[in-house]
Each structure stands twice: as C-alpha cells, then as structure tokens.
Image (cartoon, grey):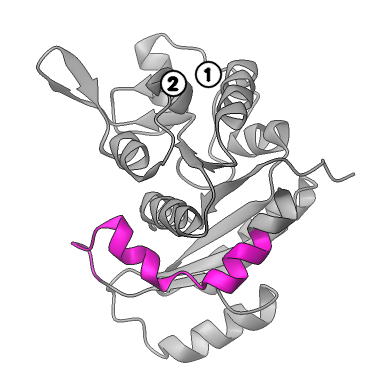
Amino acid sequence: MKTAMRAGFFVTGTDTGVGKTRTTCALLHAAARLGYSTVGMKPVAAGFERRGDAWFSDDVEALVAASSVKADRRLINPYALRNAIAPHIAAEQQGVALRIPPVRAAFDDLAEQSDVVMVEGIGGFVVPLDANHDMADLAVALGLPVILVVGMRLGCINHALLTVEAIRRRGLSLAGWVGNDLGTGLAEFEANLATLDAYLGGPPLALFPWHPDEDAESASQYVVLPRWRFLLDQVL
C-alpha cells in the first residue's frame, strides 16, 4: 500500500558519493526560482569537523546555504555523527540511537515553515540505521516521493534498477531521477543514458556534467524547470 505524498521529496542515490547533496541543493535553487519557499534537510549526517567551538558538516552547510527558509539546524540535521563512516557504526561509536520519530517531528516542523522540504538521505537507499531499521524505513515514515540520483559510471544501470526495485517494494513512488557525471569516462555514455530513460520512466529531471568545482546555484541551470514545476505541483 502506498503512503500519501507530502510537501517534499526524499533524495536518495545509487551509492554514496554520487552527488545527492549537489542534486538536492540544485533542486532547492531551482524550486526557489519557480517561486517556492524551500528548505533542505539531512536527517542523518556523518563526517563533521571542528571549527572553533562548533562542529560542522559540509553537506549540512551546503543545504543551509541553498535553502530560502533559514531554519534551526537541529531540525535540518537531527543526528550529527562525527565520523565519516556508515551511520549505524558511527552512531554506535558515538553512543547515539538513530530513531525515526524525532526525524518525522523535525520534518513536520520544517514543512510548516516552507512550501517544499528536500530530504537528503545518507549513503544508498537501504543503508542501516541500526540493527532493525534502515534509511528506507525513514523514507517510508516520511511518506515522500523519491528522487533517485544515478552516478553515471560503469554499473550504474544495475545499481539504478536495484534501487528502484527497493523503492517500489517499500510502497514509495519514484518521482524522477537525476544523472550525475562522475568524471569516470563512462564508455557509451549516451547509450547508458538512453537505457536509463527507458527503464526509469523517461528522461532525467537534470543531467549534471562533470564539473566538481561548480556551485549549486550554477548547477541548478541543468534542472529541467517545466518538469520540476510539474513534480512540485503534484505535492503542493
């Protein structure tokens, strides 16, 4: 049974390091250009560094900068894990229990403050949170349609199809997908793209070229605005 859509999207990826943060930030900027108030959320972030008296995550700071609504960081990132490793391991090392209800409460608060909340997952879709729950359980609890970020490299078709199968098995809908060139020199790039188009229900919401130093606002130019507006209208 499918869960009801809410005012936002859950951004997941075919793996870690495939461009979820870049995608989420670019979509936030594009939504703002279309007139929506926006906020990004990273329920669980791993990999913080100390700057002065505080701990910072590049991913969380990027989401804060890309959001038009300036919300409390404790809502944007309920769980801050210092070590840049798998979240369930980092949480155990830090003595933290990753619980879904506080994330749901934080999301509800952010949804009251903005038109659309972009929730970025951590790692892949089914990365464990503890012995009994994974990131997919969190996505189900939020009841959001999913945007899949596909890292365009060898193996991406298989990774994308496996992830979509997992999304649908959890009763969630795939709202769209994004292709992100990882600079690996993927052979037959266009043929891989065409295969993904065919199996994922149409062309990507955005196709980001290999440009690691490009800021998120500039990257938002690659978002297909009519398609993005259509998706936003479906949840608002």
Q: What residue type is labelled 2?
A: Tyr
Label 2 crowd (10 A; few <14 / some 14-19 / many >=20): many
Label pair 1/2, CB-CB below 8 angstroms: yes
From the viewer's perspective, tell me whether residue 156 is left or right of residue 177: left
Where residue 153 appears, as percent x and y from the top left, is: 39, 73
Using the image, determine if residue 27 lies above or below residue 210: above
Q: Mark 1 points at which residue?
A: 98
Q: Which residue is drawn at 55% across and 29% down?
A: 113
Magenta-span inclusion, residue 229: yes
Q: Is mark 2 on a helix, strand or loop?
A: strand
Secondary structure under tag 1 reads loop
Residue 79 is tagged as 2
Instruction: Place residue 230 in its image quadrant.
Output: bottom right
Q: Is residue 120 visible?
A: no
- Give the Cα distance between marks 1 and 2: 7 Å
The N terminus: image quadrant: top right
